[in-house]
Amino acid sequence: MRDILEKLMSKGLKVVLSEEAGVPVVRLYKGDEMNAATLVATCRLTPGMFREGIEEALNSMLLDLDRK
């Protein structure tokens, strides 16, 4: 997972992990400051499956960005 995070950061992206109504959410932002950052991608994970799903979600988001 560390290599995926490094790749995302090398693209100038910030990874933000949060929880909304008990559901883990992963968001990717581009920009220097969170106030002025642009949301690039978002993904909701299955509740209770964070450890199993986070690496797959980040890798999928990275692949989608590489395709664009």
Image: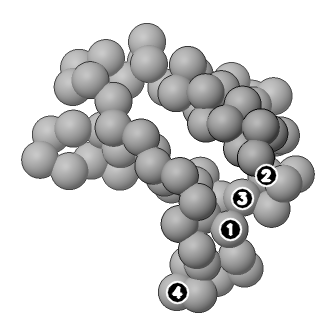
Crowd tier of the residue under label 3, counting other residues whose Cα lies within 10 Å: few below 14, some 14–19, many 20 or above:
many
Camera-nearest label, 1 or 4: 1
Camera-nearest label, 2 or 1: 1
Residue at horizontal 61 percent and vertical 36 percent from the top:
61
Q: Where is residue 47 in the image (x, y as percent from the top left)?
A: 21, 25
Give residue 9's mark: 2
Disc 2 to disc 1, how far (Cα)? Answer: 9 Å
Q: Quadrant of residue 6?
A: top right
Disc 1 to disc 4, how far (Cα)? Answer: 11 Å
Q: In this view, does 43 lie above or below 55?
A: below
Disc 4 to disc 2, how far (Cα)? Answer: 18 Å
Disc 1 to disc 3, how far (Cα)? Answer: 5 Å
Looking at the rendered structure, the kind of residue marked 1 is: Lys
Q: Mark 4 points at which residue?
A: 35
Looking at the rendered structure, the kind of residue marked 2 is: Met
Residue at horizontal 65 percent and vertical 59 percent from the top:
14
